[in-house]
Amino acid sequence: MILIIVKRKTIIVAGGQGVRMHSDVPKQFLPVAGQPILMHTISRFVSWDPDMEIIVVLPEPYFDLWNSHCRRYHFSTPHRLAAGGDTRFHSVQGGLRLIQEPCLVAVHDGVRPLVSHDTLSRVFDGAAEHGNAVPVTTIGQSMRRLDPDGTSHPVKREEYRLIQTPQCFLSDILKKAYSQEYRPLFTDDASVMEAMGERIQLVEGNPENLKITRPADLKYAEALLR
Amino acid sequence: MILIIVKRKTIIVAGGQGVRMHSDVPKQFLPVAGQPILMHTISRFVSWDPDMEIIVVLPEPYFDLWNSHCRRYHFSTPHRLAAGGDTRFHSVQGGLRLIQEPCLVAVHDGVRPLVSHDTLSRVFDGAAEHGNAVPVTTIGQSMRRLDPDGTSHPVKREEYRLIQTPQCFLSDILKKAYSQEYRPLFTDDASVMEAMGERIQLVEGNPENLKITRPADLKYAEALLR
């Protein structure tokens, strides 16, 4: 048995334009519980592992706005910026370009500030053991599936899982996966890995780790982050 | 064309024992934004239709506690109590026994205080037109389905819907459905109807209309009800 100590890095993808929020401010910059969502998100990772290296992927036109926010909110947690692309896939590629040496790399949505430290432990430990780990939650509500004829039928919710981030990987494998040609079916990192034939490992996420996309989600995050 | 005006009634099922909430108080009685959840839920229906007739199904041992809460919180919205049974199915049966004349009847979870007036319009109007209406929401997160061999694969979330309440029906059909023998696969009213061969109509719910089952849900409700 050989023990290799590798660094943990996290690419936080924050490319959203805030359309669904009915707001001119991109949603990752919306203030919640005293500071922009994205700062909460970054802090979650660094409070779990103070040595965590953070790469934030933003649309390049927002770099100045972000830097001025950091000054205004006295946000001094070290991180690097990478320029986002047209799709999430291209944004992750942008982040990966800043990663050279082998490491464990997590890819996380900037608007998921409620990831728990337990979830972070599970995804990084899972990836160290299996090469990758994807956090999921069970589904608490009854579900139906739509049929092509316009009807629907109940399905067993126990057989389904909701996918969250951070999805965590050995960097070499993830970089190889992201060297593939872009395909529209790439909805998350797991799907990019699977297109290369990798088998995905599921670990337990935390239900509060919501992706903030609607005004009600913002109130939820406000309540939990206060 | 014959226009028939029927009354709207709602059976609010509040039989829960609060196990998941780590609380001795049954969760429908937990205070949120100044009063027990169940009072918020009742008020949603009555503020939409002041003529709405409300039947609350509670475990019989809680009747006194509920009545004392009503006095304490000066909650004077008229409603009748029905005794709950061992399962949701039996509780709904208990509520239906109080309904004689034909009407539109909705069955709603007591711990869903965030149903919107728009959703109420859609379910009652839908049931008036089609005989039944079940509110659903789209799924905002990526989904995977577990395979029997321990792996999993992505599924198209667009093909699935999450089921909410109130589920609304013509009372005669619902009473007939609930005269069936109980079967464990009856997870909601729609499944009871379908076992009788009825076709279920889906209408749009509202995403905030969460079933409050976990402490984080309580914070969410608190934030939205304040």
Image (cartoon, coloured by chain):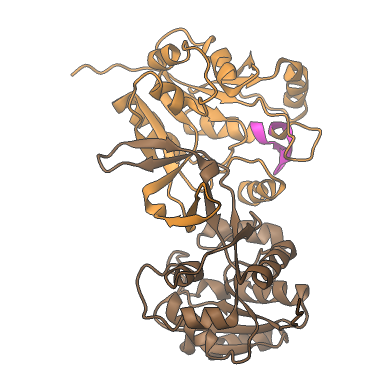
Chain colours: A orange, B brown
Residue A209 picture location, percent across and down: 53, 43
Q: Nearer the viewer, residue B8 or B24?
A: B8
Residue B169 picture location, percent across and down: 59, 74
> Which residue is farthest front?
B1
Q: Nearer the viewer, residue B122 or A2?
A: B122
Q: Is residue A84 above or below residue A168?
A: above
In percent of the image, x 45 and y 72: which residue is there?
B192
A33 in magenta: yes
Is B87 on the left or on the right of B219, as rendered?
A: left
Q: Is residue B212 above or below residue A132?
A: below
Is B29 on the left or on the right of A161, as rendered?
A: right
Q: Quadrant of residue B51?
A: bottom right
Q: Quadrant of residue B219?
A: bottom right
Q: In the rendered image, which quarter contains the N terminus of chain B?
A: bottom right
Residue B59 picture location, percent across and down: 47, 84
In percent of the image, x 44 and y 13: which residue is there?
A175
Q: Is residue B62 visible?
A: no
Q: In the rendered image, which quarter contains the C terminus of chain B?
A: bottom right
What segment carries the magenta color? A28-38
In percent of the image, x 71 and y 68: which residue is there?
B125
B6 in magenta: no
Is A211 on the left or on the right of B44, as rendered?
A: left
Q: Quadrant of residue B171?
A: bottom right
